Image (tube, rainbow, N blue to C red):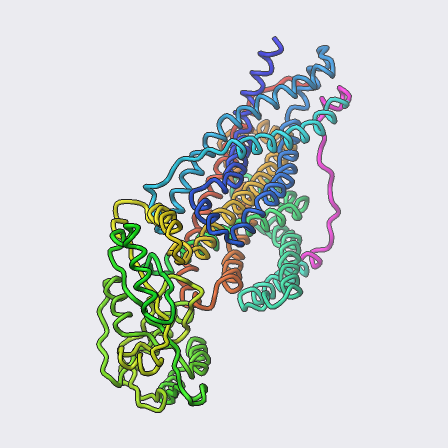
Amino acid sequence: MFSKLVSRNSRRSRKENGLFFGSLLISIIAFYIILSLPNQDVMFFLTTMESQAVDKLLSLIPALFGAALFILFFLIYYASKFQLERRRHEFGVYLMMGMRRGRLFAMLLAEDLAGSAGALLIGLPAAFLLSELISLVTARLVGLGIIGHTMSFSPQAAGLTAAGFLLIKFAAFLILSSAISRQEIGALLVERPDGTKKQLPAPVYALAMLAGIFCLAAAYRMAISGRAWENIGVMGLTLLLGMLGTFSLFYGLRFPVSLVAAHGRSDRRLHAFNVRQIQETVVRRSGTLAVCSLLMLSALCCFGAGVAIARFYGSSQPHVLDYTFPGDERASGIAGIRETLHEHGLDASFSDLFEMKIGHIQTDRDYETVFQMEPVMTALQALPSSENRDVLLNNLSYATCPYLISLESYNALLRAAGEPLLSLQEDEAAVYMDSEWTNDSKSGMLNEILQTRPRTVLDGHDCYLTGTVQTINPVTDRSITLSFALIVPDDVFERRTGDRGSVYLDGVLSGTEDTSLMSAIAEMNKKLNATGLTYESYLQNIGRHLFYMVAASYITIYLAIIFLIIANTIIGVQFLMSQQKSNSRYRTLIRLGADSRTLRGSAKRQINWYFGIPSALAAFSSLFGVRALFSGLLPSSAAENRSEMMMISAAMIFVMCVIEYLYILAVKRSSDRYLLSLMVPRREE
């Protein structure tokens, strides 16, 4: 009999509190995904490079897990309290019919364990499947292919997820159930109404609302201007103004709600009742609504900015070269590399192997006057003023002794990339700029000037710049970053560098169309390690970008899910508890002739306002928050992509708003079920 009662109550609890059960499932999934991060394919390859950034990322996982457990404890505590409060009358009846308090405690414990076990049995398999999907999508976005993917279930992550979840559930249960079990029967059978709060004069709320708007406007301005990132003090001030503004705005919302209550339309059904209900909710829980709005804002910013940054780092760098082997200052070193590759049978694994010559100008002149390009600087100054123009002028002012790149070498690179080859005369040169130092706007300015074939002076000789700005990196090693260089004919290169330039052997793997590039490079790395050759691979080249990709894809989305779960569960539980405590008002309306359709429509309008106010403010503020994150986290080379990234972020924010709408629908269904239960006549105790 006892087991049947526990089973029936557990099924009923899951059915009546599907919203809370769904939140628990999402929490379990989020826990497993973050804990299984070290087992993902992308992380395996990043770890082999011994990146300090990856180590820092992995070291954050326990802290994120602990913080999430701490926050979700209060969420579970609060939601469980709501469930137990709804069953107070039921518990009182059990005790009145002779059930011992110890047996009541055991029944509640068994119900909680059954619910937790059900959540884990559903959540862990779903978490495993979702983590595999995320791993596949991440590898695909980075462009590394998915054929080499292997499924990796993490028993440690599953065990920690189950242990952490059961721990916070059991802690919340002990606190709540012990409090329920100690109450007297009469206290359980009688409903406890909410207390009232003292109302202040209307001008006080109006001033609070104006102060909140002013603080938020100041925080928005500091955030999008980039000032918030100047130092920790300014950042703290920005966050403080944002939080104070949000709390003041929600506190001051009592003023416009009061105006609507006093002067709103009265021809709608239950209009006055709806407004009064919203008014009481705002008056009593303005602080809770402010906290939920801030949590929603955090979720929207994390999700919008995280996806956009992941997209930027996943597509910002073109891929041409797979390997670079550094030689010595003479080309004979390259011959030794080729011979070693041939001896180990690895030369056939490359579709292209070509030399890349890069050298510094050897001259007796003052290095500050080796290269002079006054016509280019004058033409730039004549262009309309802009941030990109000013940055380009500043960067080129330091290009007084640029590196030189051999034309034949760079044409081999262009041939491998499938780009048109360069053709230069003896007195001509093409401009190379690393993609980290330029963008489409800056390159467009220079290309416009290069069309005029401006005359410059290189080591005392006339040199005419021509063609378009080249940005394909001549080597895979990102430590070799040429902010500005000149591509010159080979004989000019030999004369100007004194035949003392550095020579690299660049390679492009063959047959990568039929397999994962990540797997192909990893396999080739093992073979090259046996040769003793020094090399740099594309995988090491994109390590930093891949790190940002993983961090943005996993960490920010993980935080967004946690914040959204907490905010929506708190605000949903708050409304349902408030609705339950107002059941006498709904019963009075039923006695006065209100039907179920009218009551449900009234509750839905209340839910729209109750969820809509914090959600609308969070969505609006998130546009400024995402823009602020871009200002502080992205390099200057990404400046021109911010508009595109803002569009991506706006789309992601819209997706989150759709998810929020679905959650609102779930709350409405829970409200409908409760109101329909009130339509059934009950016996007065």
Rendered image quadrant of residue 450: bottom left
Residue 82 in the image: above or below residue 216? above
- In the foreground, 675 or 125: 125
- In the foreground, 516 or 332: 332
Residue 338 in the image: above or below residue 133? below
* Residue 101 image offset from top left, x and y in percent: 74, 16
* Residue 40 image offset from top left, x and y in percent: 45, 41
Rendered image quadrant of residue 684: top right
The residue at the far top in this view is: 1
Q: State left or right for residue 94 relative to residue 436.
A: right
* Residue 560 image offset from top left, x and y in percent: 52, 47
Residue 538 part of the magenta-drawn span? no
Residue 145 in the image: above or below residue 124? below
* Residue 159 image offset from top left, x and y in percent: 56, 30
Rendered image quadrant of residue 211: bottom right
Look at the image and tell me in which quarter the C terminus lies: top right
Residue 201 part of the magenta-drawn span? yes
Residue at 54 percent across and 69 percent down: it is: 225
Q: Which region shows up in magenta?
A: 184-205
Residue 356 in the image: above or below residue 270? below
Look at the image and tell me in which quarter the N terminus lies: top right
Residue 260 visible in the displayed image: yes
Residue 610 visible in the displayed image: no
- In the foreground, 263 or 544: 544
Q: State left or right for residue 441 relative to residue 352.
A: right
- What is the total number of numbered labels drawn onto the structure image? 0
